[in-house]
Image: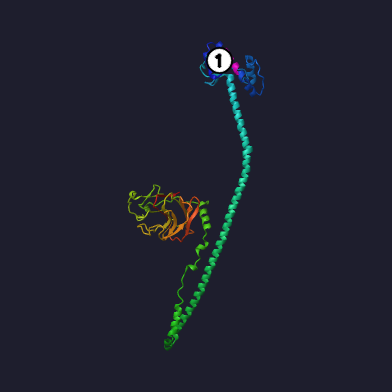
Amino acid sequence: MTEELITCDLASSSSSGDSEETLNCVKTGGMDCEEPIFSALSGDVKQQAGDATSPTAGTTSDTESGIFSVERELCVAHESELEWFCGTEQKLICCHCATVGPCQGHTVTPLATRVTAVRNELVDVCEKIQLQALRIEKFINQTLTAKEQKLQTAASRARERVLAQVSAAREALEEEEQRLLEEVQREEERVEQCLLTQRAHWSQALESLSQTRSHLVHTLTDMQDAQLVTSVQKIAERVEAAEGVGEPCDTDQLNLNPGCSDSKLLRGLWATAVLLGPNASGSSSLKFDERTVSPLLSLSDDFCTLTFLHKKARQSPQYDPARFDCLPNALGSLSMSSGTHSWVVGVGQSAAFKIGVCYSSLERKGSGNEARLGNNSQSWVLSHYDGDYSFCHGGNKVPLQVARKPQKIGLLLDWPSQTLVFYELDSIAVLYSVTHPFSAPLLPACAVADRSITILH
């Protein structure tokens, strides 16, 4: 019997006697139907007899099943047993409360039915908890145990991989160290031999000149006039020999070649260590100097993005001696003359740009080579134009082999070692590096003739 049907029966009853009879019949039937659930919950296994539909049997089943462990309470208003449950007010009521009392018209169910529903819910909850407990137990006994075993294997492999990589790197570094030290040793010996040769040659020349000078001084001071006149030929020969000694000249052969210690492997590892190491840091305050921005470019509000302007969008800014007037150039705001600095420029899809460094004395006016980045002795840039990449300095171009078009290019300037490195950000692959005796503070320098470039922090 559904709750709606029970409510309808209670609401349509006209007398208390009929209500009592109807309630008793409903209660008896409900108890009989639900007795197996109660028996199972209480742990008793009972045989269902044919007289289970009698009121006595129903009452006995209720008591034995544990529904009513104590004597039922009575309704305060009607002094009847609280055999019903009002779902609207969530409380126990008697049959009079349901038919003529305050709960008339509410959704009510027999107490036994309500107890059965609650017990069934508890059974469902217990089953769910039991299933959850089984899953947890399975997770602990199977999954976690398997994970522990896999962890040991994975950790062992990770250690082996780390050791293998470090060992390979160490072996390569040791070989490179040995090669470079031998190269430096050979170069040192070469220069020492040159110095010894030069010392011996010029010492001999100096001795020869000293002897010639002494002889000429003796001739000048001690020789008689007649003898002096007749010795002109000999004197001329000695003077010619002295003049043939020549002048000493300092050449690069007398200096240690700095390339003897140059190593692409070490340079790449050094750059990676500086960029990714525990003390890595970028120039977070770097921006473009608004005063230097060419009228061919527009500068974003955060002073970090340069955009090339088409002719119709260009404006004529107020004259400033620091501004580039004819070329699409701009300089950074950070002057670098010590320490190590790194910054990243996002070039995106720009097909024409230059990024690098320059002296602050770089020419700002006109379109000559003196103001073109990379076309003079005061600027060092990586250039991308017409699909080609190159390093430019002093008007010379060094073509670069780029595996893939970089979206972000990093620059690393190490002042103590006088080294400038261009690298591809994602892979930390060194695109080009140059060592130069910089003689003045450097400024970041950029040029863009297509789309935009941005300083990234």
Q: Position of residue 154 (x, y in %)?
A: 61, 46
Q: Which residue is tagged 1?
A: 95
Using the image, determine if residue 368 lies above or below residue 221. Answer: above
Task: Please name the residue shown 60% across and 49% down the image.
Answer: 159
Q: Position of residue 293 (x, y in %)?
A: 37, 52
Q: Position of residue 38 (x, y in %)?
A: 63, 22
Task: Give residue 36's quadrant in the image.
Answer: top right
Residue 394 belongs to magenta span: no
The N terminus is located in which quarter?
top right
Q: Residue at x 58, y 16 (%)?
A: 26
Main SS of the magenta segment?
helix
Q: Residue at x 61, y 31 (%)?
A: 131
Which range is magenta? 19-30
The residue lying toward the viewer, choosing from 356 and 94, is 356
Residue type marked 1 = Cys
Up/down of 22 relative to 196, above or below = above
Total residue callouts: 1
Q: Position of residue 35 (x, y in %)?
A: 63, 20
Q: Secondary structure at mark 1?
A: helix
